[in-house]
Amino acid sequence: MNKKLLLSIFAAMLLLFLAACGGDDETDEGQESANDEESGEEATEEQEDVTIEFWTMQLQPTFTDYIQGIIDDYEEENPHVTVEWLDVPAADLDTKILADVSTGNAPDVVNLNPTFASQLAQLDELVDMEEAVDQEDKDKYVEGAWEANNLHGVTFAIPWYLSTQVTLNNESIYDEAGLDIDSPPETYEEAREYAETVKEETGKYGYFPSLDLSLTLQHMVKMGADLTNEDGTEAAFNTEEGLETFEYFTDLFERDLIPREALVGDQRNTIDMYQAGEVAFFAGSQFISQIEENAPELYENTVPSPAITGDSGKKTISVQNVAVPSQTENQEVAVDFALFLTNAENQFEFTQLTPILPSTLETLEDPYFTEVDEDATASDLVRIESAGQLEDAELLVPPMDNYTDLNESIYDAISAAMLGDMTPQEALDQAEEEWNEILAEE
């Protein structure tokens, strides 16, 4: 150490010693004031006021108090943050988010489903949660739910609330048809057998397997078909299992064992026909509250059972997510709020208000999701059955590029087969050709 440096260090130490021992009160107060001012400046820099915009999908007015309560709690814990909440009608959300993303006005946090979120991820418009969230936080979520938000190695959202399919069975129709409500169908073949019996004995429909939205693709996967090859570049469903799916639904439709609305209607037709006492069983766990409210007598006669599946044994999980658009100027706060919104405590409270499942493992360990009381209602049984399937459930139709076009192609093909415009094999061939063209697009 050179002499000049040694002298400098000694001088500095001497000054510190003199300040500690010989400084007057005025000097001490001045130094304390300066330190306080410096500390305040640092705090101001660290806690700069931030406003983030948060969008949900049609949660008002039913869940206004719940969501606002979470916002209030977060703002109390983070006084420098203001959360502005906008609730958007479900039918308008996709259009609105696309418009705002294109004009650079995207919200900071938004509730999206994986299918649509993947389209934004395709455009590199969502924050990659694999990078933004630490491993400890990732491990708090159901694995299948976290993986449902992955496209080409990018995790584009945090899972929020979930559901799995549970079959709802009308005990009155079972009794009328001479069927045992304690042995409901759990496979597609059993569903066909029950549908035949119900039709023959009552003239009603036994089974209503909706083909709305992505449900055709889900049926194919449950029957054992792969949708694409491993790298997603070619269709892989033109196989024995894929043909079985097309033939199965064509047979049911041609024999009038399922209602016409299964093909040309949507899931609202399903619940309408079930509530009218015209259908014996369908996958409808999400409708149990509606049945309780609109048809209390039927609700008392509704018995939940495991989801119907095929040779694959697979069961589907539905996921609602929270995504952070990459346009945000407040990514750290936005991700932190998304984690707060979806934490175990807040999710447990949400599950008390509506028949959904949490995506947090800690919440699922609560007896509310594992134990059946003697006086359990249909809603209680749906919740327990649904939660019990989570371990084996997965997103059967993963995020895919050009998903809308692919889904439409499959629906058009199976429609052509069921309506008799093509044979099931011809329809499958057509879908395969169209998928390969779509998947080849960049």
Image: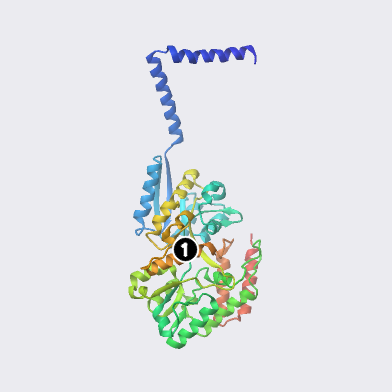
The secondary element bearing badge 1 is classed as: helix
Residue labelled with disc 1: 387
User: x and y percent of residue 174 in the render?
Assistant: 42, 81
Q: Quadrant of the C terminus?
A: bottom right
Task: Report the front residue among 172 and 59.
Answer: 172
Q: Residue at x 45, y 30 (%)?
A: 42
Q: Is residue 33 above or below residue 142?
A: above
Q: Is residue 154 left or right of residue 101?
A: right
Q: Is residue 313 left or right of residue 56?
A: right
Amino acid type at circle 1 is Ala
Task: Report the front residue among 300 and 278.
Answer: 300
Q: Residue at x 45, y 47 (%)?
A: 337
User: x and y percent of residue 78 in the render?
Assistant: 41, 41
Q: Residue furthest front?
A: 374
Task: Report the front residue among 188 and 225.
Answer: 188
Local packing at callout 1 (Cα closer than 10 Å; few below 14, some 14-19, many 20+) is many
Q: How many numbered marks are there?
A: 1
Q: Quadrant of the N terminus?
A: top right
User: x and y percent of residue 73 in the render?
Assistant: 38, 46
Quarter holding residue 309? bottom right
Residue 394 visible to the viewer: no
